[in-house]
Image (cartoon, rainbow, N blue to C red):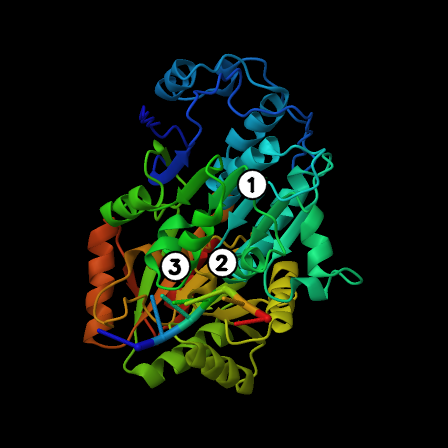
Amino acid sequence: MDISEITTSSSTINGDVENLTTRIENLNTEEPKHSSLLESSYEVKVTSVDDEPLLSVTKFEELNLNPNLLKGVYEMGFTTPSKIQAKALPLLLKSPYSQSGTGKTAAFVLTMLSRINYDLKAPQALCLTPSRELARQIMVEVRKMGKYTPVITAEAIRDSHAKTSGRSRHEEFAEAQLIVGTPGTVYDLLKRKVMEKKHMKIFVLDEADNMLDQQGLGDQSIRIKNMMPPSCQIVLFSATYSSEVRSFATRFAPNANQFNLKVEELSVKTIKQFYMDCKSEEHKLEVLDDLYTLLTIGQSIIFVQKRETADKIAKRMTEKGHKVINLHGGLSTTERDEVMDGFRKGSAKVLITTNVLSRGIDVLQVNLVINYDIPMDITGRNPDFETYLHRIGRTGRFGRTGVSINFVHDAVSWEIVQAIQKHFQREIVKVPTDDWDTVEKILRKEVS
DNA sequence: AAAAAAC
């Protein structure tokens, strides 16, 4: 099978690029005749989030794509943009939106929407995500983009049916055309035949590297993928591009056409990185208290390694008079939804959480990320670079300036910060833990 | 060994 590799160079604000790997597998034996990048028989309107006037293009040239990318597009047999692309692509490719996670999400949401036969009331497009929160966020994007299409959607996450009052899951999933969910629930629904699979046309695995390399999530994702009909298109999205991911992805979807699109999806360059040298584990809590007492901080996320740490520091910070909320997988689904909704609305400013929110979550106003615990692998000795990048990527979204502060408290955490600095070739600047005027001056310069 | 993910 023909393998095309398209690499765009960066043409954007900061010039930094990260790999966004998209593997597209099409098991149809006959080569489809493309007239447009995404096939669509249904007319779809796309609206801009800010209700800005929408540009429309009639030629791919007008999109200011990298010449090499454009060359690939033509070589594959695409000629002119379809109706949906004419309106959607300028929006998707526009700066600074191309920097946000929404750009990536929009790309596969658009693909899913364009694959659906809207006359057929059955599941046709399925997207898996590593967390409940990310699934819900993607569904918001789906409903925005599909606002003017008759698409029927359903969330396949725990207890989702509790909110769709009056309808059973059987009823809901019988007619749903586009489904976004987490692997456990999706697998359960497929196994129990609550969700039909024979009309499935596109299967999207978001945060594929994370999904595939994790025991549990990986098993479930593979089982689900194997349940899809042979004609179903498989699309893997991954923000990292390690050889491990590549080989796993190859086993997951052999015979795949592979596209490597370099985008500035995740970038350490727009995010200022600092570290604070704490004396001990206990001292970290005091520094955190001081930080929120003595500085004025907008919305922020505090990442910890364990659920119990999240609970512990949430309790301690509350006792010290700070208003914080806390989110991890140990909470009930209702609690998780309430906490997340509150944080998105801005009614809560400080969110303490685990790696459940390290990936993909977009909250515009977040301008500070604190790594209360430095991300490490399960040995507790080695840095977890991917998680670090994803975590600090929760700030500085949409081209805004973001700040991240790493708490260091012993030799191991110090070593890991040094390793991270070396790995990303970006300086992580030390700020004092006892001179808050200085800290404020340093941070103010960045957050202003 | 962490966290996530089903009933």
* Comes first in the chain, label 2 or label 3: 2
Residue type at the position of mark 3: Asp
Q: Name the residue that disc number 2 marks.
A: A183
- Label 1 neighbourhood size at 10 Å, few (<14), some (14-19), many (20+)? many
* Comes first in the chain, label 1 or label 3: 1
The numbered mark 2 sits on a residue in which chain?
A
What's the residue at 51%, 80% (across, down)? A314
Looking at the image, which is closer to me, A24 or A132? A24
SS class, disc 3: helix
- Whole-angstrom CA distance, mark 1 to mark 3, is 20 Å
Res. A363 visible in picture:
no
Residue type at the position of mark 2: Pro
Q: Position of residue A61 (x, y in %)?
A: 48, 14
Left or right placement of residue B6 versus residue A22 in this view: right
**Quadrant of the rendered image containing residue A334:** bottom right
Res. A346 visible in picture:
yes
Residue type at the position of mark 1: Met
Left or right placement of residue A419 versus residue A40 in this view: left
**Quadrant of the rendered image containing residue A199:** top right
Q: Position of residue A424 (x, y in %)?
A: 25, 50
Q: Name the residue that disc number 1 marks.
A: A200
Find out whether the residues at labels 1 and 2 contact each other: C-beta distance under 8 Å.
no
Same chain under badges 1 and 2? The reply is yes
SS class, disc 2: helix
Q: Name the residue that disc number 3 marks.
A: A219
